[in-house]
Image (tube, helix red, strand yellow):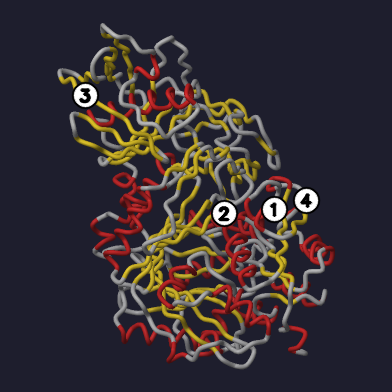
Amino acid sequence: MDRSKLYRRFRTLLIANRGEIACRVIRTARAMGLRTVAVYSEADRDAMHVALADEAVLLGPARARDSYLNVERLIEAARKTSAEAVHPGYGFLSENADFAQACFDAGLVFVGPTAEMMTAMGSKSGSKALMEKAGVPLVPGYHGDAQDDATLAKAAEKVGFPVLVKASAGGGGRGMRIVRSAAELGPAIVSAKREAKAAFSDDRMLIEKYVDNPRHIEVQIIGDSHGNLLSLFERECTLQRRHQKVIEEAPSPTLNAAQRETVCAAARKAAGAVNYVGAGTIEFVSDGKDVFFIEMNTRLQVEHPVTELISGIDLVEWQLRVAFGEPLPLRQDEIKLNGHAVEARIYAENPTKNFMPSVGRISTWRLPAETGGLRIDAGYREGDSVSPYYDAMLAKMIAWAPTRDVAIDRLNRGLEESDVRGIVTNIPFLSALIMHPKVRANAIDTGFIERELAALTSTAAAPGELELCAAVAAIVNDERQAAQGEANSPLTSPWQTFGWQPVGRRKRSFAFRVGHGPEQKIILNYGSGPATLVVGERELTFTVVPKDGGFDLTLDGVKSSVAAVIDGHELYLRTRNGRFDLHWVDPFGGETEEQTGADRIAAPLPGTVVAVLAEEGARLEKGAPILTLEVMKMEQTLRAPYAGVLKSIRCKVGDIVQEGIELAVVEPSEE
């Protein structure tokens, strides 16, 4: 193959992706003087990546298969805008060999490996066979071409349960199931194949031994077209949920220097087996003693920023320079490890409801400034909408410091200073996770989050005196700003809100509650003399000085910084004691309560019915599966809320259902 057609200098780059990674690539490309082209679906017309790019092309409807997975429309978008190269980002078509080949056939530079390299290493089955031949240690398993149920069942029995059923072309935990018995195998394969087909257009499966209490370690590699191949240290990605990484760090706190060199050398050997060109990741699983190759990702990884921060290398810039045909700028011995970096993935999801994705408009978006070793890679802004059609990741927060402990503390401070409202996010969960004593001690494995989930999602502490006073101050401050139209003059008395009076005192009563808990009352006294707040038996003087994102609240001479967001009657507060969500009880009785009970089998979000798992008239136990929805590229199984009879199913496979629509009815048993 003529390398001049594969790698050459270009001026216009099309980014075949969306969200955070599209924004990330656009920033580096523009810094290098390149013209950038974004693509978008109808759901993403006003998305952040569209606004950042020099040009943008509409691909089609919201569903990924009609837009971001449509190869013909992507190639046509490049032609329309005179783009000479395509960066695939991660996810979608980033590891699709047919897409890489289509770009080459269209005369476009594909910023990544060739289709042949991608086929050899991007297939989990193919790469395992190649690594076995090269002598790289593998997890025991089956990675053959035969995909019939009998072959897969026989392979699982040979390997021995528990096994991992895994999409050969997969990533991000999609198309992956842990199977602990032969009885679970058939349904797991069907579900994994369906999910893999929807996410990657490829439902081939492999079977491998499930390593109990494993650690996940991966090595960043990059090669150029001149035969140079480098490793850029390793990352620890053990903290996972549903096989999706949640927290990543570099370097791994598990490995010593000798182990680090051994695993990095194995990664270079693995990539060298196909003379790899471009950025990629060699992934390993460790049982505490040995390290086994599990797969290669032939693309940039979500967690690449932690490697960038410890190496000082912009991996997207290096990707683009490799695509230009340039040699890598450094030799292996010139790459130095500096400090420690930790990354947290911020998702629109509710950890207290089994991480159910959250959709809607972002009404408040406050993330800390990128200073003091903190980096934010975001794909959303205030006012943007999170749709149900794509992955729910909003942003990544990455902290660097000379040591791991300080990096974790910096990341936690950044999370504590983040306020995202209008949707539910996992920010409090991330903070609880990285501050867990076992995480700090690196006493973890890939099942840690599932085991500790109850503690990590436990109900927050009840608001105390400070929080109740802050809630009143937030309301008073908000009303004053609305009345005056400016936020810079200090509120030294609520007279500014309620009208000045020279003599006498007036009072105003407030009531708040957390969830469905009891009301807690507080009284504001104002008029002649200082304003005071009465909480229980105590009466405290107070003043409020507004500032960006909140205010300074002084109670009896003690000043506290408070972050506050008010959305109707819902108040979000952040004080020195943590995060608090309070409901302001309407004094005029305008309360509306959620009427949807836990016994309704309804769509939690807009999605597609992909499987009906029970028949009408069936007698069900509590928790029995009834149907499966595909929501945000992941499958959600809806189950019987109690034992009873399935009276009716109000949908069929293929139906696109809206949030809140009742999908099935279970009549509870008498007992």
Q: Say which quadrant the N terminus sits in.
A: bottom right
Q: Secondary structure at mark 4?
A: strand
Which sits in the foreground, 139 or 248?
Answer: 248
Residue for point 43% across, 39% down: 353
Labelled pair 3, 4 in contact (Cβ < 8 Å): no
Q: Secondary structure at mark 2?
A: loop
Discs 2/1, front: 2
Q: Residue furthest top?
A: 504
Q: Position of residue 213 (x, y in %)?
A: 33, 65
Q: CA distance from mark 2 to mark 3?
A: 43 Å
Residue for point 40% across, 29% down: 571
Which sits in the foreground, 382 or 276?
Answer: 382
Q: Which residue is mark 4?
A: 60
Q: CA distance from mark 2 to mark 4?
A: 20 Å
Q: Which residue is mark 1?
A: 64
Mark sitting on residue 577? none
Q: CA distance from mark 2 to mark 1?
A: 17 Å
Q: Which residue is mark 3?
A: 541
Discs 2/4, front: 2
Mark 3 / mark 4, whichever is N-terminal: 4
Amino acid identity at mark 1: Ala
| Relative to 394, residue 403 above or below | below
Discs 1/3, front: 3
| Relative to 177, residue 294 above or below | below
Q: Which residue is mark 2?
A: 379
Mark 2 / mark 3, whichever is N-terminal: 2
Q: CA distance from mark 4 to mark 1?
A: 9 Å
Amino acid identity at mark 3: Thr
Mark 1 / mark 3, whichever is N-terminal: 1
Q: CA distance from mark 3 to mark 4?
A: 59 Å
Discs 2/3, front: 3
Is residue 462 at least partly visible in the picture? Answer: no
